[in-house]
Image: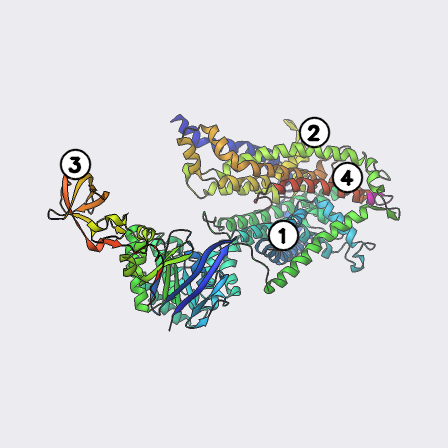
Amino acid sequence: MGELRMEGVSVGFGGKAAVDGVDLTVAAGHTLAVLGPSGCGKSTLLRIVAGLQRPDRGRVVFDGVDLTETPTHRRGFALMFQDGQLFAHLDVAQNVGYALRRRRLSRRVVRARVADLLDLVGLAGLEDRRPGSLSGGQQQRVALARALAAEPRLLLLDEPLSALDATLREQLATQLRDVLRATGTTAIMVTHDQEEAFAVADDVALLRDGRVVQHGPALDVWRAPIDADAARFLGYRTVLPPEAGLSLGHPGRSTALRRNALRVDSTGPIVATVISSAAGPDGVRLEVQVEGLGALPAVTDDETAPPAGARVRLRVQPSSVAALPDIGRSVISRTD
Amino acid sequence: MRVNGLGRWWPAAVALVPLAFLGVFFVLPVAGMLARGLHPDGHWALADAARVFGRPRERRVVLFTLGIATLGTAVTTVLGLPVAYALYRLRIPGAGVLRALVATPFVLPTVVVGVAFRTLLVSSGPLGFLGLDGTWVAIALALVFFNLSVVVRTVGSAWAALDPRPQEAAAALGAGPVRVFRTVTLPALAPTILSAVTIVFLFCATAFGVVLTMGGLRYSTIETEIYQQTTDVLDLRTAAVLSIAQFVVVVLLLVVVERARSGVRPQPAGAGVGRRRRPARQDLPVLAVTAAVVIFLVLPLASLVARSLHADGGWSLQNYRRLGTAGDGGALLVPVGDAIASSWRIAVDATLLSVILGLAVAVTVAHRPNGRSGRPRRLAVLDAVFMLPLGISAVTVGFGFIVTLNRPPLDLRDSQILIPIAQALVALPLVVRTVAPALVGIDDRQRQAAASLGAGRWQVVRTVDLPVVWRPLLAATGFAFAVSLGEFGATSFLARPDHPTLPVVIYQLIGHPGGDNFGMALAASVLLALMTAAVMAGVESLRVGSVGRF
């Protein structure tokens, strides 16, 4: 129970396709992150699922029931906006209880349920506060509690953490993941932040120009980007042409390297010249010249940074390197 | 440090000029008028004053004022909200034209509105069979006609600017359309609605020209009663007591408006503005109300124009040709053409005055020291102070001019300058309300950025403020001009018989029945309406949202 299917969903604005033939499935209890740059159509896709936007073509099916013509408030979903969209004229308890009061539950039941939900998101005791007096992170957690209170069959999250600063984002991502697991809620989250996506979601779909270019379990997508653009969007720093593949262990394949793919190791097979180096909070970062490969980033565990011009040996970290599939297989869909 | 010192004090300096103006030409006359009534012969006569409200006539006047204003406000609101929704949230053909049509009555001279309704309702008129001429129902209808635009424009533009996402969030949480409206839309609009409703009540309760031309002697409101008591009965005490009562009510209402306005949250930058949606089946009742309201607005004006073209039992321009004369039976001292010329001259002076003063007030009200956001309390008070002339009986001001500005150093009684001054007082709040929002909307960091890039004070004004403000300023100029052209309450007191303005002439023509005077009044009304409508069409083409919003 709780499986969502998008079948051939398309919508265009002014003759330009915003969402173009999207087929995606979210298994019951799973969280899917729709990941893509701004303008890729991910928010429009979410609005279509929510029923706030009519698709030109295609269907939205939940548990085998076609919901395409069902108005938003009858879908039994809940939507959480990037900036929370708390109702400023209601206090925290009234916000969280918004969906509950519709069900003619007794006052006592509503109050208990609201308290439970606030406890779940770590805001116990803030019932009487106005949204305006809360921090950004607290507002987002109230918005999450409000959405969960509806006991939605499907929770829709529109960049839920993007408005927050880095530390808070990490903290809330973990919390969000735990809450989704604990409540067994099926969820779709759209985001442009790959770290946010991987911190929260089981599955990831990469969206580009309204089309799904890659879809699969989060780790699989992360480890095997479909093409150079996907690799860069997934946090890989450099993409090298097939000729360079041999020295990186993937002969004849284009290779994507993360920032820490090359590590200084006195027994490493690759010889390089240091161009520049800088000590950072997470170790020393180098820029090195590798013969036949050009300028590349590298890292070292040594406390002292080697000077420019120094010769160093490097070892490849296999987990930080991804071989890209041959051109021509541009779309892989792994829905299992 | 000297520059800093100057920087801190210039808003106060700019505010001084309009404050001084308000002091001499508003507070002094009103106070003089009140003193005459309550403090005659050098001692207080409060007991006599209190007795005024014990008299059945005065009690009737007060009750009638409250009753007719409540009724007018209620009907205006009930009709205005669906129209606001239809014209600002739905995609209907010709919505732009309809929005302009709804806005027109507000700037029509009150005398014209009164005359237009009478042509419709007199026994020989198209709706004469209803027998409404001279009844309170007719007065209430005219008040609704007049004030609909306040509700439609104020609430409509707030509705159009409403961020749709909270409504979507509510829908996504399972709320149906009715519940979304009740729990999200209505609370968001409530401060705006309250503000509009209070302003409408204010306008209804202090309406003068409409009541005088339509109520005749049967019905009078506090405002027309003040006029009667000062001009006909010469009972200054009663007039003064009524003025005080009105003043207290107006101040209370302005406090309510200010409270409501402070509850209007500015839309966050980049908030998504809901797109207008195609009408659906459930919008039918709203569209039906809108259609009925449009007919209600067109009918009196169409009737006025038709009747003005009717003379000697057939269609003719006779009434218009007669505007070159002074009417029958000594109705006027000068031809109507002369009155048109003086109306224009006076309106130009009044406009200049009100725009210069209004700009000074707007700059002061919008100024936020040290780039802090939000409005300091004293500026909110200042803002409300300059709104006062809107609600104080124009009659009180006009009569106050005559009783206080009649001795040196301010012996201006015989001077024609008093008329533009009085009209400028009436137009001033409207100028402030049009210009101030644009100034407030400029992020002070824009000015700081310009200054940090090397712009001097005047260059900052020229490159940051002026590009934003010139349109609202031009719109305010036109608005002030239209209001001056149609101003009747204060002008009726101050205009000398040999130099009347057009609204005064129209009133005099109605007051002298017989001959072709009524026909001339109709023709003059059409001309006046055309002039104000033309000016307002120009204003409308500037597309400044804050015109006529409260």
For image coordinates 20% across by 55% down, the residue present is A318
Q: Which residue type carries mark 2? A: Ser
* Structural crowding at the residue carrying mark 4, measured as other residues with C-alpha within 10 Å and reported as few (<14), some (14–19) or many (≥20): many
Marks 3 and 4: same chain?
A: no
- On residue B415, the disc is 2
Q: Separation of disc 3 and disc 2 at Cα?
A: 92 Å
The answer to whether residue B368 is magenta is: no
Give the residues drawn in magenta, as a range.
B513-519
Return the mark for residue B95.
Answer: 1
Of marks 1 and 4, the one in the foreground? 1
* C-alpha gap between disc 1 and disc 4: 36 Å
Q: Nearer the viewer, mark 3 or mark 1?
A: 3
Could you tell whether B317 is left or right of A244 in the image?
right
Asked if badges 3 and 2 are on one and the same chain, I answer no
> Could you tell me how far apart the alpha carbons at marks 3 and 4 are, in whole angstroms?
97 Å
Quadrant of the image occupied by residue A145: bottom left
Residue type, mark 4 in image: Val
Nearest the eye: A2 or A77: A2
**How far apart, in angstroms, are the residues tagged by discs 2 and 1?**
46 Å
Which residue does the numbered mark 3 point to in the structure image? A309
Mark 2 falls on what kind of element? Answer: loop
Subunit of label 3: A
Q: Which residue is mark 4?
A: B505
Q: Secondary structure at mark 4?
A: helix
Chain of residue at mark 4: B
